[in-house]
Amino acid sequence: MDALIAAAARALAVGDPLAALKRVGLRDDASALALRGIAMAQLGDLVRARSLLRDAARRFSPREAVARARCVVAEAEIALVSRDLAWSAKSLASAASVLQRHGDTVNAAHARNLEVRHLVLIGRLDAAESVLAKLDPSPLPPALRATHELAVAGLATRRLNTTVARAALARAEAAAHTSGIPALTAEVESAWRLLDAPAARLIARGGERTLKLEEVEALLASKALVVDACRHVVHESGETLSLARRPVLFTLARLLAEAWPGDISRDTLVARAFRAKRADESHRARLRVEMGRLRRVLRDIADVNATERGFALLPRRASEIVVLARPVEEEFAAVMALLADGESWSSSALALALRTSQRSVQRALDSLALSGKVRAFGRARSRRWMTPPIAGITTTLLLPAPLPE
């Protein structure tokens, strides 16, 4: 490694891309192209950065396996930042294995951290936890240790384990300050704000109030029966029943929970659950069928009783029934939740994260664009979508519930 390459690498390590470009900006050898790519990524030109890294990987000889693997890891990081979630996770895992075999444990750990962040974004929390459990952050330099702790905090936040998340963010904050990289410090500060912002609404006995993540965690650990409208599940004493794939049953469960301790009329249930303006006998017959199904699903934790005017929910063990709702409820809230991180997303990445069809996402984006809530830039496959973050609201609970892996 010549002196200019070494100096450029040191500049990039402390977050000074301009100093790095002064040393290698006019060179086109493989090492210089790789460093130029990383510098352009730090400056925000992600398209140019990926192009340079791909050129560098092609120019490194087959014998320079470590250098090629580092280019793959750098490109994966750019793809993650630009929310291109369709990149090959196998290529990243292969690069991590190459780096580990050749003794580059630092970059191998960095590759695993990228894998964890990718898995969290697409909702595969169990897989992310498995990868994270095998990582030892102790040998990492401060910057990478901070990103590792951010990954730990991100996973813990999605798991609603705020104690672990706060401890990880404290470690990330210390490591970020040690690294001296302002962008990293700002990312940690943003994560802190996420934990302190309103995360959901509690609806109970005709009233409602906002909750922070710690309060949501405490609620789910309590003895209350919680109808979770953020993730479309029902919680009670550590037991979780998912109704994510049975939307009509979940709507009925929520309506009954909002009415507790009273009942709710059949006409209201038909109008809200079936979207019928006027209830006829066919609607009433369907309501009886769906209530029978809901009664079977909830039989271990609650009874669904018929009353003179409608139906009522009666818990078997819980002392109360509450509804946990999103802080802001509107159509396409899940799409808005992902876009609210301030990053640019492609429709294919949104579909992958939401586990739905790309066409459904495109229809949602078109509707949101017409109302001015999102904006697009680029064309065809390079088209990306963005929206400003929702001020003062954490979007963690707006994300789709992770399905069984």
Image (cartoon, rainbow, N blue to C red):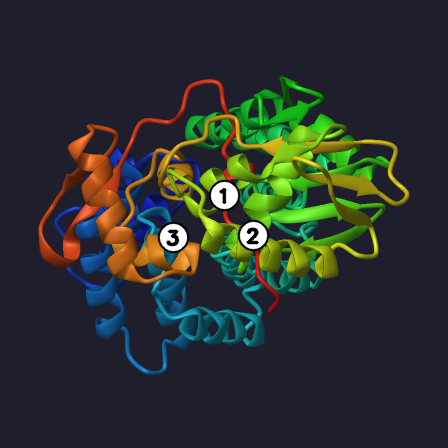
Residue labelled with disc 1 = 270
Q: Which mark is residue 323?
A: none
What element does badge 3 sit on?
helix
Mark 1–mark 3 contact, CB under 8 Å? no
Farthest residue to the left: give it.
379
Question: Residue 315: which quarter of the image?
Answer: top right
Mark 2–mark 1 contact, CB under 8 Å? yes
Name which residue type carries label 2: Leu
Residue 15, percent across and down? 39, 35
- Separation (CA) of disc 1 from disc 3: 44 Å
What element does badge 1 sit on?
helix
- Separation (CA) of disc 2 from disc 1: 7 Å
Residue count near mark 1 (Cα–Cα under 10 Å), binned few <14, some 14–19, many ≥20: many
- Residue displayed at 36% across by 76% down: 64
Residue labelled with disc 2 = 287
Question: Residue 16: which quarter of the image?
Answer: top left
Q: Is residue 171 visible?
A: no
Q: Nearer the viewer, residue 11 or 380?
A: 380
